[in-house]
Amino acid sequence: MHGRVKIKSTAQQEEEKRKEREKKLKIYVAARDACFSKRKEGVWDDEALQLTQQLLSSNPDFATLWNYRREILMHIETVKDEDEVQKVYEAELSFLESCLKVNPKSYGSWHHRGWVSARLPRPDWARELSLCDRCLSLDDRNFHCWDYRRMVVKMSGVPVDQELSFTDRLIGSNFSNYSSWHYRSTLLPLLHPESPEPPSPCREPPHSSPPPSPQTHSHRVCEEQLLKEYELVQNAFFTDPNDQSAWFYYRWLLGRAEREEMISCVYVSRDEERVAVAFSRPVNAQSVGLLLVLDGQPQRVEWRSVHPRFKHSPVWICDLPPGTISDITNEHNLTVHWTEKHTHRDCALYTGRTESWCRDSATDQELFRSELSVEKTSVLQSELQSCNQLQELEPLNKWCLLTIILLMRALDPLGYEKETLAHFQTLKEVDSMRSAYYSDLCSKFMIENTILKMEYAEVRVFSISDKKLTTLCHLDQLLLVTHINLSSNQLQRLPPQFAMLQCLEVLEADNNSIENLEGVYHLPKLEEVLLKNNTLQPLASCPKLKRLDLRGNPVTQTANVEAELAELLPSVTDLLL
Amino acid sequence: MAAEDLPSEFDVVILGTGLAESVVAAAFSRVGQRVLHVDRRSYYAANWASFTFNGLLTWIQEHHEESQPEEAQDWSSLLEEGEELIYLSSDPASISNVQAFCFTSEEDEEEEASSPDPPNTTEEETGGANEDVVKETSETESADLKEEETKEKPEERADGAEKEQRFTALNDGKSTVQTDVFRPITQASKTDGKEPGADQPTASAAQSQSEPAKKKISYAQLVKEGRRFNIDLVSKLLYSRGSLVDLLIKSNVSRYAEFKNVTRILTYRHGKVEQVPCSRADVFASRQLSVVEKRKLMRFLTSCVEETEEQRAYNGRPYLEFLCDQQLGDNLQHFLLHSIAMVTEDTPTEEGLSSTRHFLRCLGRYGNTPFLFPVYGLGEIPQCFCRMCAVFGGIYCLRHSVSCLVVDKTTNRCKAVVDSQGQRISCSHFVVEEGSVGTDWKMVTSPPRFLSRAVLITDGSILPSDSDQQVSMVTVPPIAAGCPAVKMVELCSSTMTCMPGTYLVHLTCQSVGSAYEDLSPVVTKLFRTPESHDQENCPSVLWCLYFNMTDSSGLEVEGHHLPSNVFVCSGPDGSLGHEHAIKQAELIFQKILPEEDFCPPAPNPEDIIYDGDNNSSSMGGEENGGAGEEENDGAGEEEEEKKEVLEENDGEEEKKEVVEEEEQSLQTEGIRLQPLETGSGSVGGSDSCSPPAGSQISRRDAVQTPEQHTASTHNPQRESASCMMGN
């Protein structure tokens, strides 16, 4: 009686909506076909602009139509004067804004906007920046918008400090934002570059080398600002230690030492008439301009990597022409030039010696601190303290534990070995999904420590048994090792990199889970292999191998194994099956 | 006279347009019940109303005036066999101790400004206050006259402000001439005579000392800009996951309102105002907390989301004790107790924890605090529900009351009501505001409780920050033993409740003494008034109002001796949220219609079918009737309301509005609450809106992998109501 309101039933609504959809589809298809035929005919008129606009506003991800539209706009540029073009493009920008409201993550719209902005005769960058700000306030992880914004900033030359305060603002409203932290890491070195003091003497390579290239230091930040950043990021990870974006930024802040590009070792063996060269990073020796000079004479030699699988390798070898150095009464002087990097290394082979080498030891190079930082020890020490403080509050936080491990390694890898192992144990428990990763990382650190110990002891024996190793790394550092003991670990393979142990004579690898001996190829000096209790299947071939202990391996079950082995390994005299 | 225009039969008659009554009205009308909703006042929302500055002055005056008890007309002629009448009270005295003060310039000085009469105790009602007023009037008569003479600005007299002017003059007296230098008031009185000349130099000299750039806003300006104010009688906030927000979303009533986030939570501690870090972003940005405190706070907040054995062990023991044992330190303890749980030191742990949880659940839905505030003030909310009721056929009459109930003697049920025009209107149910029920009919179980309220207009924020558009919730713990804890809300001009350059501050507490006794010590500590000392850096109070309001939270829907089909809605309660009124409305609805859905989602306007001419003419007829009935402002408002209703019914029109909203979605400033299942007609662009993902305090336990954590924040979750914020 009082004009009660009636409501349409759902079926009725559905039907109406269906009809509406059908009608829309018909219009859409017709417009699309009209556009295609116009484009085919090469018509670039206003009507086409209208049609594409109509279609794109309902479906902004139609790339062909954007292309057509660009063709039309480029045509308009040729026929109209600047003011008119400006007007057309401004209209285009407001049309794009409406498209972005429909889909703020449309590739097509953002790309077209970038294109238009770049062609606009008199661009209004402030307007573009505020558009980006609005989009980012709706979704601060809209990467399309971030990309576009970077372009706008670049084109309009927004001052770096303004951009830095922009990241301050975004991080303040939600610090769980990789884009902002990352952006910060690109801005800070520009705004507060590290003062050009000479690097600490311990980092100075013992051999003179060209001054560090500008890129090497470009991403470092001056200490004063760095301390402020530490404070900021600590606020973030103390507030929410489970948010990884802050931890990643923290890792970046702590830094990463740059290793000098150099020849780290030259080894020459009189018996094999062979030279092995180790580089500070994997290279392709065939293309970096490697030159071998023997007693003042450049030699034409063929460089090969230690394993045929490697095109890039830190260790390369070459055979000298037969007879060049075989006379033990002669003294030889070798120089290897890395012409591309203007660096070289000399090595003298004295009378009566069968081999010789020249190198920087791992301890000299502070090699394994490179994972984290070259900052002053006191800063690292105080960072370690605050992380320890957090760890007391959050004993099971994996990011904190991992950061503590890295800081400890940067400070004193051998001194903190026990704590490091304990933290790794906790990590594997609290983050079991990644326990394999932690095992590998732990193995790496243990190997580094063992290398350091070996270097301090000045021996060529590398022994790391019963340390739960799961992987082998830094094998290029073991070029000179003659005895290696890897027994009672959890290794599954001796990887191809194992072939870098060019001086290896004795390999002990009992009680592992080794299935694959790929790396035991081409080891010219290998004499003894102990592989008790593994899970080996195939067999390897080494010319001088005399003693082979394969007890407890599946391979021993194979029929005729002895005969086959005898054929493959002619010099094996002592075979234990 | 125009009584014939009202239909003589309704399903439900509702007297009073407070929040609970309005929700009930909307709920009944929505399920097809015939609703008559009347209010004897000339404005909507009863004690929940918002007023312009001038409107508030009128309201103050009304509460000072001797209310003339209406002659109880004898309507027994309308009775039939076996019926009797119950007369309703027409003089609800829920407001008492009204005192207003003006501390700004362009008015004469008056004694009361600095040494007010001993404030009335809560027991005294309006009558008591009226006596004061009368006395003041005689005292200030001469000053009043002088003021008339010295007036220079013609606009002061414009728009009928004269009445208010006079009233203010007699009630609160005038400003101190020098607003920055406080001198004994006797001195100030002496300068009165030479005011026009002396005023300017002194004031400007004082200004140049402390606030060189800022000119203080005068009383005349407040009156002139009075329409920019929307001053609420109650001071509440909406918990973003509270029952009111849920109801607004569920019922689609939200389409009539827009909201602002409360932008920060403040607290008063060690003599200064501090920001309380409560969301993740706040904790991150806080400069007062050490990193260790940050961790402890975050950990505590994360851990208390779920109930643990450890917490249960504290049941019955004070929350403060629980907090102490968490080794959080003084800072955090204060924040957690007073600002987050908002409880007192002796509140039991389970209660403290549950209000902490409620606070935390509300965080991050719309912003970094748990609270929303309606643009244009809280008085909007009851009106939104009335509008929904009207859309579905409810009939509204302001300045129209129910004078008595017709009760069937045998069944003791209310058969009909007799309205203020003497028309008998049958109804099946009657819902009435508490104030209209005489005390004889109430079952009094506990002594009446009161709320103390203060409303201040100030010239600055109590904690200035980068933005001058902050909406702040401030908790003030008891400033001395025996004092009440005060909740304070500071509103900025973008909430459309005060003129630019001013802030509107609401203070609320449970009464211990009168509003003035309870709240003026807090005002004096936090603001600059003639009574305060050494408050150079505090904002000045330009104008303020104190009053007491009945706290009716103890009242039961059926706690009365009235017939069983009569339900009483209580007025505003002292809590911060709206839970009490919403719960009450739902309870009444369920008692009457247990089978029906409470406020189901209203359909989109385009889905509503109109019966054609028949219908609209009947609507039109009603409207004319309503408008013709009364010729004053009240009827005008009513007419406006009905016009809106008609527009509402015009689907086309509404659709246009929606489209406009879409276009502005990137620019809109306010927040619109939206239902989860956004239908075809809902506001577009919601896809682009993600809640501030990081601001929710994660309840994930620390062991869980951070990768998962980021994955979930990376895909902005679709919230049940998306947040649209501009700038």
Image (cartoon, coloured by chain):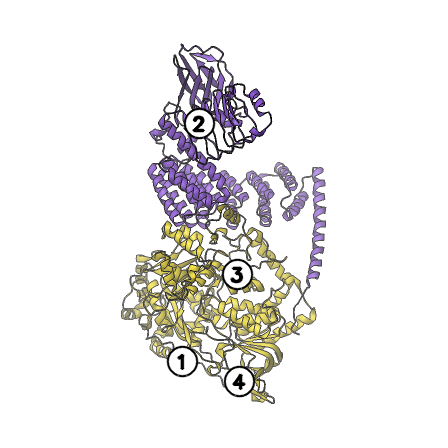
Calculate the distance from the C-alpha at mark 2 to the C-alpha at mark 4. Answer: 106 Å
**Disc 1: CA contacts within 10 A as few (<14), some (14-19) or many (>=20):** some
**Which residue is disc 2 drawn over?**
A484
Question: What type is the residue that disc 1 sits on?
Answer: Gly
Q: Nearer the viewer, residue A13 or B625?
A: A13
Marks 2 and 3 on same chain = no
Nearer the observer: mark 2 or 4; the answer is 2
Q: Is disc 2 in contact with disc 4, using a CB cutoff of under 8 Å? A: no
**Which residue is disc 3 drawn over?**
B258
**Which residue is disc 4 drawn over?**
B86
**Which residue is disc 1 drawn over?**
B127
Nearer the observer: mark 2 or 3; the answer is 2
Chain that the image shows in yellow? B
Using residue B552 as the reference point, say whether residue A559 is left or right of it: right
Q: Nearer the viewer, residue B181 or B641?
A: B641
Query: Mark 3 or mark 4, which is nearer the start of the sequence?
Result: 4
Q: Secondary structure at mark 3?
A: loop
Q: Quadrant of residue B302?
A: bottom left
Q: Nearer the viewer, residue A458 or A303?
A: A458
